Image (tube, grey):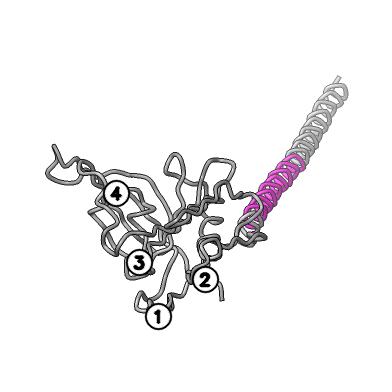
Amino acid sequence: MKRKYILLTLTIVIMGIISVACGKNVDNKSTEISEVQSGKSDATEESEENTIEIESQNELSDSQEEQSEEQNTVIELSNTYTTQFSIVKGITYPNFIFDYPNNWTVTKEEVTQTGETVILSNSTGATITFSHIGGIAEGQLGSGSSIAMKRVEISKVGDSQFIPGYVQATDYSDLGGFMVAKLKVTGQLDMQTDTDFQNVDGAVSYAIVPESWTGIRDDVHSAFTGEFAFWYSDYISFIAESPNGQFTSDEEKEIIEILSSFRTEN
């Protein structure tokens, strides 16, 4: 009886030892599985981070390439126009020249007894107008509207190839250097009701004018083709305008290039 009791006790002890050992093995296996899963999770997160970083770098690279392409875009001025006033009239007067790309077209050519008009247009209705206004003495171009007046800011946006010189026996080099100017309407005044200009975010135009004109004019009464004409034995202007007073960035680049090419025939 005593032996049976001892054997039973040994059996219980041995089973307890085996149970504890199995429990440890299970815990170890769970720990190993957890570590493996954790390793996989870390690797997945790292892979995702690397993927995001690569995508960001690719997007930045694409953006830089697009900006570089825009900056390196060359506007090809493949056409040249020469004004006809002196040729048609058979008189001594400078021929003016300008270049333009294929997406602009000469839509008007007119030579009169006293002057000339040439209009260059694109598909959106933007125009560049060359005006030769003759038959009028210097300072007598006209006062324009007696009701409305504009304030215009004149700023340089490009260089000009035009170099003033002699017209017949008169030297106009004292006009100084010329520029491609942005003309921005910043104020309007109704002379019947207003005592001062009303600030506005107005129309934008471009023109060839002397650099000395940089600044603000608050006495603009009439069309820009006359207001921003310079005296060169007759009045001459080269003005870019649009139907809504605004231009796309591509149009601005083209207009600046076209206006910059304005010059006299050698």
In the rendering, at what x and y percent does residue 262 appear?
A: 52, 65
Disc 3, disc 4: CB below 8 Å?
no
Q: Residue at x 62, y 62 (%)?
A: 80
How far, Cα to Cα, is label 1 from label 3?
A: 15 Å
Query: What residue is disc 2 on?
Result: 264
How far, Cα to Cα, is label 2 from label 4?
A: 32 Å
How far, Cα to Cα, is label 1 from label 2?
A: 16 Å
In the rendering, at what x and y percent does residue 257 appear?
A: 55, 61
Residue 169, labelled with which disc? 1
Judged by depth in the image, the label closer to the viewer, 2 or 4, is: 2
Residue 186, labelled with which disc? 4
Point out the stretch of residues depicted in magenta: 35-64
How far, Cα to Cα, is label 4 from label 1?
A: 40 Å
Residue 256, labelled with which disc? none
- Identity of the amino acid at label 4? Thr
Q: Reading the chain from its start, which is encountered first: label 1 or label 3?
A: 1
